[in-house]
Image: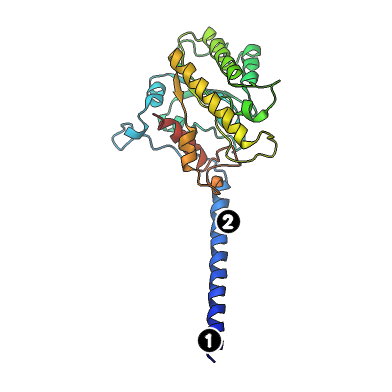
């Protein structure tokens, strides 16, 4: 009889554990589905307090530059145009909160090489649409230069990367000689991507070199440099990237855009 009781107790424990695991799996699936479901309205970043003053944690140099400009012109790739999350750019929580005029030149897969071609062969910027306004260009390029691994369409190393970035700034400055520039370190990938054949360790090494030369270039030329990736990585719990990301690279619209915007606004 005692043996039967022991067996039953063990069976109940096993059944309880199995039930508990099933509940966890269900909760995990529901939360993941909720996070991955892109929303039409991106959350507005809570930059201001009840008195209408900017909160101290957001009152950095990036915020000051934007608040003192008439127009903010964002230049970048898929993360800047929001091609993977229903058309929501990383900066949307900021522009909505600050209610500022902005424009955008960005497309999926864009490299520094691509942007030079676009600037030289279109009037996207050279039309001088905002010549009579205080303007700041916020440029985030380099991600696809690293991920493509193709030197024919991207910067093959950090020297060529900064050469291309300098060319982009020079082309823009020809039309807007008094423009301000904010150069953001290239967004990083946080896992293996099927179409990318560059190993993660090689990616990280190249991203580190790109970040370093970009920071030096900004310091030498009086431009604002922003490195948001450390903040983003700190908030990405291993195995739960999907809470913020559509895939291994792009922020989702529900939580990801807010995280990326915070990363830029909280950089010191």
C-beta proximity under 8 Å, tags 1 and 2: no
Q: Is residue 115 visible?
A: yes
Q: Position of residue 135 (x, y in %)?
A: 46, 16
Judging from the image, what secondary structure is the residue with disc 2 in?
Answer: helix
Name the quadrant of the C terminus.
top left
Q: Report the coloring of the rendering.
A: rainbow
Which residue sits at x=46%, y=13%? 179
**In terms of sequence position, does the residue under pointer 1 or pointer 2 come before the other?**
1
Choose top left, top right, bottom left or bottom right for residue 44.
top left
**What residue did someone put label 1 on?**
5
Q: Residue at x 42, y 33 (%)?
A: 97
Depth order, front residue of 234/66: 234
Dot label at residue 99: none
Q: Give how far across and how far down residue 45 sits, in percent.
A: 42, 37
Left or right, 28 with respect to 43, comes to: right
Circle 1 crowding by C-alpha within 10 Å: few under 14, some 14–19, many from 20: few
Q: Quadrant of residue 189?
A: top right
Q: Secondary structure at mark 1?
A: helix
Q: Residue furthest bottom?
A: 1
Which of label 1 and label 2 is nearer to you?
1
- Percent across and percent down for residue 38 are 57, 43
Question: Horizontal placement of 154 versus 50: left or right?
Answer: right
In the rendered structure, find residue 29 and report the number of the disc placed on it: 2
Report the side of 64 relative to 108 (left or right): left
- Identified at 45% across, 13% down, the residue is 220
């Amino acid at each position: 009889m005692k043996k039967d009781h022991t067996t039953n107790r063990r069976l109940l424990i096993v059944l309880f554990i199995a039930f508990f695991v099933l509940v966890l799996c269900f909760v995990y699936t529901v939360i993941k589905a909720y996070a991955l479901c892109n929303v039409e309205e991106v959350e507005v970043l809570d930059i201001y307090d009840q008195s209408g003053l900017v909160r101290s944690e957001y009152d950095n140099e990036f915020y000051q530059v934007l608040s003192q400009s008439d127009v903010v012109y964002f230049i970048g790739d898929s993360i800047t145009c929001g091609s993977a999350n229903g058309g929501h750019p990383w900066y949307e929580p900021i522009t909505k909160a600050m209610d500022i005029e902005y424009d955008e030149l960005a497309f999926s897969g864009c490299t520094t090489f691509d942007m030079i071609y676009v600037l030289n062969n279109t009037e996207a910027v050279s039309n001088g649409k905002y010549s009579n306004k205080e303007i700041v260009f916020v440029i985030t390029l380099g991600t696809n230069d690293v991920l493509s691994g193709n030197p024919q369409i991207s910067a093959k190393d950090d020297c060529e990367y900064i050469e291309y970035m300098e060319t982009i700034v020079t082309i823009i400055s020809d039309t807007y000689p008094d423009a301000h520039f904010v150069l953001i370190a290239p967004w990083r990938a946080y896992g293996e991507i099927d179409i990318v054949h560059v190993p993660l360790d090689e990616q990280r090494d190249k991203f580190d070199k790109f970040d370093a030369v970009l920071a030096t270039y900004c310091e030498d030329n009086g431009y604002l440099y922003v490195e948001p990736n450390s903040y983003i990585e700190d908030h990405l719990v291993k195995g739960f990237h999907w809470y913020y990301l559509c895939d291994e690279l792009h922020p989702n619209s529900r939580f990801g855009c807010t995280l990326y915007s915070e990363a830029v606004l909280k950089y010191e």
